[in-house]
Image: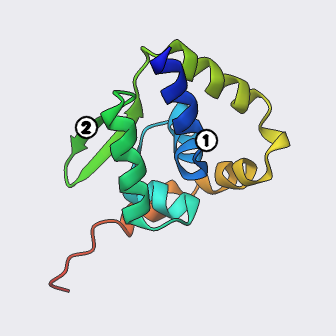
Amino acid sequence: MNQLVNIFKLLSDETRLRILVLLYQQDLCVCQLSGILDVSQPKISKGLSKLRDMNLVLDKRKEKFVFYSLKNENSILLNSLKNISDTLDFYPQLVMDQSRLVEKEKYLNQCCVDSNE
């Protein structure tokens, strides 16, 4: 029962919910999530940390970036995200996030600015 309660606690936070909906669609790095959601990088990282602590996401380093993906083991979460994705038109903020997802490469290029420049 605790797992179920914890999943819904996670989903009750708007930023974490938006992150999960995007990760349900594809792997993304922190800077892409920050750009797409127009939310600060520290807030995205905090949300991802909670998701990682609950063993819901994986992180994988690719060159200088760390990409996050959903783990496929939690059927409650995956079914919830599928239902949300299937009815996306009812959620204007999620529709906006979806439309910005196509610009994900733009945000990736802004991610790791060399501090020596």
Residue 87 in picture, x, y percent from top left? 80, 32
Q: In the rendering, which numbered label is found on residue 60?
A: 2
The C terminus - image quarter: bottom left
Examine the rendering and report whether any part of residue 41 can be seen: yes
The amino acid sitting under disc 1 is Ser
* Placement of 109 over or under 28, stated as above or below: below
Tell me the crowding category of disc 2: few under 14, some 14 to 19, or many 20 or more residues within 10 angstroms, Cα based: few
- Residue 102 image offset from top left, x and y in percent: 60, 52
Q: Provide the residue designation for mark 1.
A: 12
Q: In which quarter of the image is residue 103?
A: bottom right
Task: Give whichever of 3, 40 is nearer the camera.
Answer: 3
Q: Is residue 25 visible?
A: no
**Residue drawn 37% across the image and 64% down it:** 42
Lateral position of residue 40 relative to residue 87, left or right: left
Q: Which residue is at 36% across, 40% downward?
A: 68
Q: Nearer the viewer, residue 24 or 11?
A: 11
Q: Is mark 2 on a helix, strand or loop?
A: strand
Q: Quadrant of residue 44?
A: bottom left
- SS assignment at label 1: loop
Q: Do the residues labelled 1 and 2 touch (CB within 8 Å)?
A: no
The type of residue carrying mark 2 is Lys
- Drawn side of residue 88 relative to residue 72, left or right: right
Of circles 1 and 2, the one toward us is 1
At which x and y percent is residue 21? 59, 38
**Compared to 108, does 12 lie above or below?**
above
Q: Which of 90 and 67 is in front in this view?
A: 90
Q: Residue 117 carries which label?
A: none
